[in-house]
Image: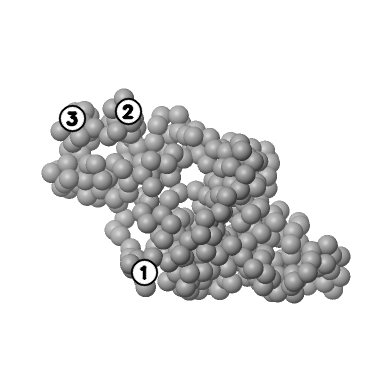
């Protein structure tokens, strides 16, 4: 799994220093610091949400963290990812986050995996980490639904969060309780990514802190927000909560399926997004706006520009993986043009 262990040296002073460092939270009624120190937490994503989560959990004295992220630090990350500085640009996020976590808590055991999470190995990741709790800090819907399904298959509690522009949402999904798919049955089709819509850095800090709070409450035995969707709006300065219950008609996942690796990648992000972020060398590019009318609706298959037909012809009889920033636009593209692509023997998959 490409796991790197940041070893924790044996130091008799660590116990004394940990007690002194966590003195204020030890005074909280019902808060079990010993349980926190024994807790194992898997954090998937070390970006805008992952940074405040890792920072808070390490500072609180969580005993073991496993940080998973495939990306490297970019200059545009620093505005909302406070574990990183300018000297860290181009370094793997997971490794930088691990170093910062160890600075906060030298007794911490921290592992890193620099790899994109997918269905082929996520259950192996869960088994290797043996976490008490999984924290989803990813920024694409495809990853979020995968992690939620995998956590339910593995019987693991999941702290989930999402953020966009001036707001965000947080919840804790327990294996036998409400699930992400009970609240949002399918991947939303119209939500923009942070790269396109923007996000206030301070908002990610608030939402990430709320997620870390849920983790600490869970591992220390305090009441949690399980069964509740908490939504934060920075512009109005309000938090609202909604009850969530399991849908008896929903099929509970018992395993994960994998798919063939696409032979070709198709990027449907806009030009500025592609220029500012990872381009995936060799990928084809068709901005979704070129296939949309003035109201933003995708053109029917009968009205698409000739360039799209030429693209399908150029990849005839191949598997094409369609991607964007969050997965929502890729899903829209596949739903709109899978049948048209099929006329050229092209099989589309939203990544």
**Pointers 1 and 2 in contact (C-beta within 8 Å):** no
- Give the number of the disc on residue 303: 3
Where in the figure is residue 86, as x and y percent of width and height?
Answer: 67, 38
Where in the figure is residue 79, as x and y percent of width and height?
Answer: 64, 37
**Which residue is rendered at x = 20% and y = 34% of the image?**
300
Which comes sooner in the sequence, label 3 or label 1? 1
**Pointers 3 and 2 in contact (C-beta within 8 Å):** no
**Which residue is rendered at x = 51% and y = 69% of the image?**
174
Quadrant in the rendering for residue 253: bottom left
Residue most toward the top? 294
Quadrant in the rendering for residue 149: bottom left
Q: Which is in the foreground here, disc 3 or disc 1?
A: 1
- Graded by Cα atoms within 10 Å as few (under 14), some (14 to 19) or many (20 or more), the crowding at tag 1 reads few
> Nearest the camera: 268 or 179?
179
Under circle 3, the secondary element is: helix
The residue wearing badge 1 is: 248
Q: Count every numbered label the image shows and give the total.
A: 3
Under circle 1, the secondary element is: loop
> Nearest the camera: 141 or 280?
141
Quadrant in the rendering for residue 68: bottom right
Left or right relative to 48: residue 291: left
Which comes sooner in the sequence, label 3 or label 2? 2
The residue wearing badge 2 is: 295
Answer whether residue 282 is visible to the viewer in this image.
no
Where in the figure is residue 326, as x and y percent of width and height?
Answer: 43, 45
- Graded by Cα atoms within 10 Å as few (under 14), some (14 to 19) or many (20 or more), the crowding at tag 2 reads few
Question: Does residue 27 lie above or below 89 as drawn?
Answer: below
Q: Which is in the foreground here, disc 3 or disc 2?
A: 2
């Amino acid at each position: 799994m490409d796991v790197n262990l940041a070893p924790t040296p044996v130091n008799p002073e660590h116990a004394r220093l940990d007690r002194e460092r966590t003195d204020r939270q030890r005074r909280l009624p019902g808060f079990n610091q010993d349980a926190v120190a024994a807790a194992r937490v898997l954090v998937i994503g070390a970006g805008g949400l992952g940074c405040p989560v890792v920072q808070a959990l390490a500072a609180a004295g969580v005993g073991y963290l496993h940080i998973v992220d495939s990306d490297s630090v970019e200059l545009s990350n620093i505005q909302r990812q406070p574990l990183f500085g300018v000297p860290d640009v181009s370094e793997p996020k997971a490794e930088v986050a691990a170093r910062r976590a160890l600075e906060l808590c030298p007794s911490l055991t921290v592992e890193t995996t620099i790899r994109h999470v997918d269905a082929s190995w996520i259950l192996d990741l869960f088994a290797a980490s043996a976490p008490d709790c999984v924290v989803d800090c990813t920024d694409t819907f495809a990853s979020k639904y995968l992690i939620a399904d995998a956590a339910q298959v593995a019987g693991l509690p999941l702290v989930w969060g999402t953020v966009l522009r001036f707001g965000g949402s947080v919840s804790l999904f327990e294996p036998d309780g409400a699930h992400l798919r009970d609240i949002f049955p399918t991947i939303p089709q119209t939500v923009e990514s942070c790269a396109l819509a923007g996000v206030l850095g301070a908002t990610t800090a608030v939402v990430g802190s709320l997620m870390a709070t849920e983790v600490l409450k869970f591992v220390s035995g305090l009441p949690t927000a399980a069964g509740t969707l908490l939504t934060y709006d920075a512009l109005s300065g309000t938090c609202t909560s909604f009850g969530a219950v399991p849908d008896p008609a929903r099929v509970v996942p018992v395993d994960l399926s994998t798919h063939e690796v696409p032979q070709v990648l198709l990027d449907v992000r806009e030009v500025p997004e592609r220029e500012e972020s990872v381009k995936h060398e060799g990928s084809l590019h068709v901005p979704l706006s070129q296939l949309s009318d003035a109201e933003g609706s995708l053109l029917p298959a009968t009205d698409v520009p000739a360039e799209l037909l030429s693209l399908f012809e150029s990849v005839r009889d191949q598997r094409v993986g369609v991607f964007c920033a969050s997965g929502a636009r890729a899903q829209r593209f596949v739903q709109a043009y899978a049948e048209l692509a099929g006329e050229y023997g092209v099989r589309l998959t939203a990544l």
